[in-house]
Amino acid sequence: MRSVRAGVPQGSPLFYSAYVNDIPRPSTGVQFALFADDTALFLLSNCLRNILPRLQRAIDELTQWLRLWRIEVNPDKPVMIYVGPVFAHAQSDALYDLQIVQNKFCKRAADAPWYVKNYVLHRDLKLLTISKFMKDSSERFFDVVSSHLNLLLDSAVSYEPSPPHHFCRRPRNVLIDPPDDLTVEVEKLLELNKMAID
């Protein structure tokens, strides 16, 4: 038997609910959702510049509370996992801003010092970058939908993506986009590790 110095024993949903009852609600208009031990912060806005600072402030407030009550964030769980074919229409600078938020959250979750490179953090946490996750999810989506029995669904996704220089992007374009710089660095590091093991 082991004494519990912080948190609650495993399999005690009532104790856990009481333990997290005073979790701070964000003061920035960010919505907060709890389901068992999963937490989601989300914000609806038509401007990314409005979202990022408010979301960051909410993450900072939550981080302080988690540290106070010695609750560890599981770095193995993906951060910012929602993605869909609609993200293929996002501008590269918008995805870059989302990647910055993910990087900051990862550093805080892992309690990594400022000098740890983002690509090292992604490798160590086994965490995909936003663009890599988006591309992998889109590939799975198109694979499943293209073999669907519904012919209308199949015809909606079976088209050739427009060339990269074309002004009109369609969801399938994400499959031919070149990887961003961070993804390239992470993949290089993973390849070096694989070579060292072999």
Image (cartoon, rainbow, N blue to C red):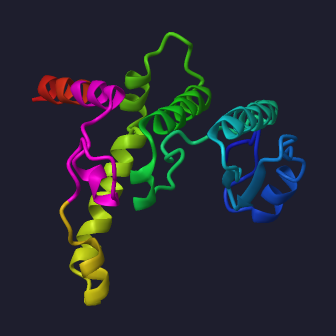
* Residue 118, image x, y percentages: 44, 23
Q: Is residue 185 left or right of residue 96?
A: left
Query: Residue at position x 69%, y 40% from top?
Result: 51
Query: Residue at position x 32%, y 26% from top?
Result: 181
Front-lying residue, 186 or 68: 186
Q: Is residue 90 left or right of residue 59?
A: left
Q: Is residue 84 visible?
A: no
The magenta-colored residue range is: 161-188
Work out which residue is located at the far left of the displayed protein and give it: 198
* Residue 170, image x, y percentages: 33, 58
Q: Is residue 161 visible?
A: yes
> Is residue 171 shown in magenta?
yes
Instruction: Classify residue 144 by image quadrant.
Output: bottom left
* Residue 105, image x, y percentages: 59, 33
In the image, residue 8 sits, relative to residue 34, either above or below, namely above
* Residue 1, image x, y percentages: 67, 48
Front-lying residue, 110 or 188: 188
Query: Residue at position x 43%, y 17% from top?
Result: 117
In the image, residue 8 sits, relative to residue 36, either above or below, namely above
> Is residue 14 shown in magenta?
no
In the image, residue 109 sits, relative to residue 43, either above or below, namely above
In the image, residue 190 sits, relative to residue 79, either above or below, namely above
Instruction: Classify residue 153 by image quadrant.
Output: bottom left
| Image label count | 0
Query: Residue at position x 82%, y 50% from top?
Result: 20
Work out which residue is located at the far front of the displayed protein and give it: 167
Q: Is residue 156 left or right of residue 120?
A: left
Where's the C terminus, which quadrant?
A: top left
